[in-house]
Image (cartoon, rainbow, N blue to C red):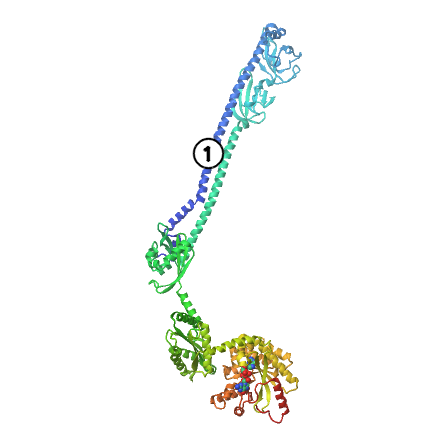
Amino acid sequence: MQSQAERLRALAAGTGSAPTDKAGLRRWLGLVLETHISLPLFTALVLAVIWAVTWHFISVDRAAARAAARSSSQEMIDTYEAQVARNLGAIDQTLRVVKYAVELKGAAAALPALNQKGLLPSGLVFIVAIVDSNGRIVASNPGLTTADVSSQGYFRHHRNNNADRPFVSEVMADAANPEWHLHFSRRLAGTDGHFAGVVVLAVDPAYFTSGYERSRLGERGALGLYGNDGLFRALRTGDKVTWGRGAPQTPNARGDVVANEWDGVRRYTSTRGLHGFALNAVVGLDESEQMAAFEQQRRHHLWMAASGSAALVLFVTLVGLWSWQMSKTRRRIRRAQETFAAASEASLDAFFVMRSICDDKGTIVDFVIEASNTRAEQISGIGKQQLHGQKLCGIVPRYRGNGIFDELAKVAIFGGVHEAEWQSKHPAIGKRWLHRQVVPVEGGVVAIVRDITERKLAEERIRHMAQHDDLTGLPNRSLIRDRLDQAIHHARRRGRCISIAFIDLDGFKLVNDGLGHNAGDELLKVVAQRMAGCMRREDTLGRFGGDEFVIILDDQPDDPMAVAPVLEKIRAAVNEPVLLECQEVQVSCSMGVVMYPRDGADTNTLMMNADAAMYRAKELGKNGFQYYTREMNASVEEKLVLLEGLRSALEGGQFSLLYQPKVDLRSGRMFGVEALIRWQHPVHGMVPPSRFIALAEESGLIIPIGDWILHTACRQAAQWRDAGLPPVTMSVNVSPRQFEEKRLVERVGEALAANGLDAGAVEIEVTEGLIMRDLAQSVGKMAQLKAMGVTLSIDDFGTGYSSLSALKSFPISTLKIDKSFVRDLADNAGSQAIALAVISLGHRLNLRVLAEGVETEQQRRFLLENDCDEMQGYLFSRPVTAGEIAGLLQRQAGLAGAEAPACH
Ligand SMILES: Nc1nc2c(ncn2[C@@H]2O[C@@H]3COP(=O)(O)O[C@H]4[C@@H](O)[C@H](n5cnc6c(=O)[nH]c(N)nc65)O[C@@H]4COP(=O)(O)O[C@H]3[C@H]2O)c(=O)[nH]1
């Protein structure tokens, strides 16, 4: 079986399983056939041929030039030999004639007689002389001075030899003829044959080289005559005529090149012996001059070959470089293809490489699958071999109808990238989510298909988590809004109505606080299930947050009462007791109902109005539902008006503080006051804090307002102290946002310092709800305040969510029983129980307990009897001005030791 690696290699090479050696051979051949390799090889061959031919021509030319020079040398020697032979013949003839005349007429008469007959040569060239047997010149033409030549070589030669042959002397200058000359001589014999003297002919050596033709012999040619004795009688090289030593050693030279003995110059040298004289003629043609034409030709050949070669090499280099670049590019492309093939094979994505099939007009009519990978095989359920060559619309005809083919064709024609996700139900892979990306390639497209089922599921999970509440699994706030948007959209189109109800659980906080968050969560789950059980499948039930739920009933008639049975069912279901941590708990719910389109045309308005209606239901005794009415909206509008006014209230000096006394229950003495803010609105008159504190909170204005309260209260306390009044603790309410503000502790410190007040003179009142928002941070901040010397009390205790275990860690000094429990003390056992529980709890934790809102003597007595420490309420005093407090304090000081001030 083929291994994965082999298959990858085969795929990369684009073949099946070709034998390695064949593939190697093919690769090698391919390499050799690459232009950048084959072309230089071929060029080397061409260069070799060019140079071989060049060398051949040069050799042939050289041989021809040498042969021509040699033959020219021989021709010249022939000519020169003939010329010299003629001259020598003429000279010898003169000698013979003179000899004859001397022998006939005597030495004195011979020359004049011959001269008269014109038989003597010109005296300008030759000097003819007759020497007697004693060696004295007896006659000469032209006339010479009488001289003794008996010591001369030619004289001695003839005196000692009686042979009748001419003699040629060396070149000399003597007393008779001071010019350089040579002698030709013959022996004169008496009648009996005895030596009678010598007839001599003197001649200038240049006479024998006058035939030197520059046109034939060149500038450095040689022409000369030398004797068998090895001495030149005449030698001309160029313009120079010399004689003496240095004659050639080679007799009968035939035009070969030799370095001439007389000057070492290489010449084509020919020599020839002269008949009848012991003389030889020599001709030399300078080698360099003779070969000059050839050398020029040779240089021409070499230049042609070299420039041709250079041009060829340059051309081949350029072509080779270009080819090398092309080959590199091809290799890169091949490698990229191989990499792509290997990568695509290893990829988890399916690849389909498709070529466009066009009709005559160039319109794409289908795609043919040219390549694919193993993953494509798995996704399509068709084997790779079968897949290749198949037409796309042949395999999947529905692609033509569902637009996929059109998308592919668009990418192939116009480029760009097409991406889409779809759910496949192909039997090969089952129900899976797939993503396709189609990219254009040369002549077609590549489709990359990826299985994205896991991602889709994860997205689905995330979407569900983002849109649903963790605890109950119900739609959360964002999905509720979406659903309502959709419902409004549909209802608008169909002309139908929608009922929306805001549901808030009554008493949930008590359960959450009393039994803990887990119980609270469980309660929410149970209630959510029960509510869901009261609704149709197409209705929406969602958790808006905390203990708030929303229901959307779609497709309702235009009758608000139509929703009443469902709401009643929900109310009853919520009222059913729930078993939590072995304890039976009962909660109820308050619902605010709005109708689309009557109560609002958009989601925001409907939600706001439903919220308002729900609050009205709460105000009206809870455990029921309220339909929205326009009047409810008035409070919303009022809110906006108040908010507008609140922004300028501080600068406008519209705020003031009232102070409500706090009294010791047992002694009846006022020991402190609580600062309570008042807002004198220029239009609406006195606005109670219950109407604007929350607004100031929401808008953030509570920070500057709270600062103002702190400073005003501290200033007031300092004024009372400075007025010599008995000391009282000044309690200041701090709202949640104010408490959470980073600089609270510093701000309190600043207010104290600004008024020179001891920290112990101020008490901060915080609510339970505030502390529980961020327990750890709240406790930390309270500890900081306590460390400063400021005391703390918990306001409205019993209405919030503080767990009893957490209470231990609060650095507080007083618990304030909320006035709602105090109000019902007389006749509500539940309120009594709570008040007693708070008193007992406070005492156990070493805290003082203050009852708020004490209005009646009955309430005061109950509290006193049950060991409550302090009280605050209309029974003693309503919140009053600083001046009134001063009066009260003065009165209290005056009555000190007498009786406590009367209750109002
Ligand atoms: N029915 C009845 N009510 C009594 C009686 N004795 C006192 N009260 C009222 O009970 C409220 C006590 O203040 P609280 O519980 O802190 O409740 C305060 C407090 O939460 C907030 N508030 C008032 N002044 C300030 C302030 O200066 N700063 C902050 N942050 N909140 C303030 O506004 C709330 C309402 O303040 P007020 O309208 O001044 O209402 C005051 C007070 O006038 C009584 O015997 N019967």
Q: Is residue 484 visible?
A: yes
Residue placed most toward the observer, 530 or 552: 552
Q: In this figure, what is the number of numbered marks?
A: 1
The local secondary structure at tag 1 comes to: helix
Q: Can you give x and y, in whole percent of width and height, for residue 334 in the image?
A: 42, 51
Residue 97 position by quadrant: top right
For the residue carrying disc 1, how many other residues have a C-alpha within 10 Å: few (<14), some (14-19), or many (20+)? some
Q: Residue furthest bottom?
A: 898
Q: Residue furthest front?
A: 683
Residue placed most toward the observer, 881 or 374: 881
Q: Is residue 165 visible?
A: no
Q: Can you give x and y, in whole percent of width and height, for residue 272 in the image?
A: 53, 20
Look at the image and tell me in which quarter the C terminus lies: bottom right
Residue 652 position by quadrant: bottom right
Q: Can you give x and y, in whole percent of width and height, for residue 709 in the image?
A: 59, 79
Look at the image and tell me in which quarter the N terminus lies: bottom left
Give the residue pinned by disc 1: 53
Residue placed most toward the observer, 253 or 472: 472
Tell me the amino acid under the disc marked 1: Val
Q: Is residue 435 above or below residue 44?
A: below
- Answer with the quadrant where ligand 1 appears in the image: bottom right
Whether label 1 lies within 8 Å of ligand 1 gets the answer: no
In the picture provided, is 579 more to the left or to the right than 815? left
Q: Is residue 377 above or below residue 488?
A: above
In the picture provided, is 241 more to the left or to the right than 807? right
Residue 100 position by quadrant: top right
